[in-house]
């Protein structure tokens, strides 16, 4: 991992949700390597020493971890509590909306509370948190919202209907928000990872849907995805398609809209 790879982020206070997940902890390590200050939020708190286990970090990195906030983002209260806790820690400059959950199955087999959890966690909670942080950002005339979306946010994914719905919604929200706030000095970045080697790839399946194993060649590494993502954040880019497959799907979709198999229901 290159130290100080993202100079604009050095010294900034960055909140990362889902911080102890596969992409979350990778975000945190790369941010620390560039001497950004971080606030970690997740369902649990963990010893920060765990961050150093996956690779070298710069001297004094522990002091850059400003705090941890345990918050369940499956409720408006969770988002509010996270915002209040952050206010007590530092002025946040960058919010990385990363927390997420996945499961697979035919839509009729998905328990309704699971579908609601997914929509809350991956669409409503980022919208609520953004609404909470936005007035502070506008008052200061700076701030950056980063949304971890997915290729499933532009390619509809059968057997992942509510995941796709949340990610399509998140993309629409983030793009519209960018149109509102960019000229007022604020930034939005939307990241569209393809399959990436984290725990989310072992998510449960409901019902009898047969999910083929994903060949390893199609799976990106978290370090590669997050390096590309943070480079784009540092350069204030709106859309980030990290890795070959994300770019390939985006380009293919532009020229061949029928790639999404929602057009061929008999093949599922
Ligand atoms: N990995 C991929 O293939 C891939 C591809 C495209 C997009 N993404 C997106 O990348 C983001 C990060 O996912 P990941 O791959 O790093 O998966 P992950 O390793 O499962 O991490 C997800 C994190 O979100 C946390 N979380 C779950 N429910 C929560 C809740 N109610 N409140 C607060 N936090 C909660 C999880 O905590 P627990 O572990 O305690 O549940 C976990 O730390 C997600 O938005 C995902 O949709 C991932």
Image (cartoon, grey):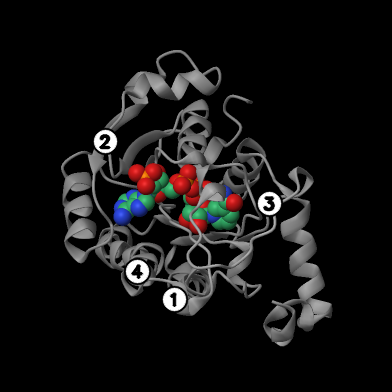
- In the rendered image of this protein, does residue 94 appear above or below residue 48? below
First in sequence: mark 4 vs mark 1: 4
Q: What distance separates the C-alpha of mark 1 from that of mark 2? A: 31 Å
Question: Where does label 2 land, which residue?
Answer: 68
Q: Nearer the viewer, mark 1 or mark 2?
A: 2
- Alpha-carbon neighbours of circle 4 within 10 Å: few (<14), some, or many (≥20)? some
- Alpha-carbon neighbours of circle 1 within 10 Å: few (<14), some, or many (≥20)? few
Callout 2: SS: strand
Q: What residue is rendered at 31% in x and 23% in y? A: 47
Question: Where does label 1 land, which residue?
Answer: 180
Q: Is residue 28 left or right of residue 88?
A: right
Q: What residue is rendered at 70% in x and 46% in y? A: 219
- In the rendered image of this protein, does residue 201 appear above or below residue 12? below
Return the x and y of residue 261 as percentages of the image width and height.
72, 79
| Number of disc labels | 4
Q: Is residue 15 left or right of residue 259?
A: left
Q: What residue is rendered at 34% in x and 74% in y? A: 112
Q: Nearer the viewer, mark 4 or mark 1?
A: 4
First in sequence: mark 1 vs mark 2: 2
Q: Is residue 48 left or right of residue 238?
A: left
Checking the image for residue 119, the label placed there is: none
- Residue closest to the far front: 208
Q: Along the line of sight, which residue is nearer the eye, 91 or 81?
A: 81
Q: What distance separates the C-alpha of mark 4 from that of mark 1? A: 14 Å
Q: Along the line of sight, which residue is nearer the eye, 86 or 198?
A: 198
């Amino acid at each position: 991992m290159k130290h100080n790879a993202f100079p604009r982020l050095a010294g900034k206070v960055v909140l990362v949700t889902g911080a102890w997940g596969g992409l979350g902890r990778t975000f945190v390590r790369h941010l620390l390597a560039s001497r950004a200050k971080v606030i970690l939020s997740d369902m649990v708190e963990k010893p920060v020493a765990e961050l150093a286990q996956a690779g070298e970090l710069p001297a004094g990195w522990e002091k850059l971890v400003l705090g941890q906030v345990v918050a369940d983002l499956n409720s408006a209260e969770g988002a509010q509590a996270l915002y209040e806790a952050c206010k007590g820690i530092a002025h946040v400059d960058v919010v990385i909306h990363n927390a997420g959950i996945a499961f697979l199955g035919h839509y009729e087999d998905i328990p309704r509370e699971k579908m609601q959890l997914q929509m809350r966690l991956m669409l409503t909670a980022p919208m609520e948190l953004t609404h909470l942080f936005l007035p502070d950002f506008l008052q200061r005339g700076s701030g950056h919202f980063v949304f971890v979306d997915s290729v499933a946010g532009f390619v509809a994914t059968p057997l992942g209907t509510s995941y796709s719905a949340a990610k399509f919604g998140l993309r629409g929200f983030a793009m519209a928000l960018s149109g509102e706030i960019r000229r007022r000095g604020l930034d939005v970045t939307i990241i569209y990872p393809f399959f990436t080697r984290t725990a989310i790839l072992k998510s449960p399946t409901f019902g009898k849907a047969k999910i083929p194993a994903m060949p390893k060649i199609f799976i990106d590494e978290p370090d590669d995805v997050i390096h590309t993502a943070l480079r784009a954040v540092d350069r204030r880019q709106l859309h980030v398609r990290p890795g070959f497959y994300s770019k390939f799907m985006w380009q293919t979709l532009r020229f061949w809209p029928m790639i999404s198999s929602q057009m061929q229901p008999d093949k599922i």
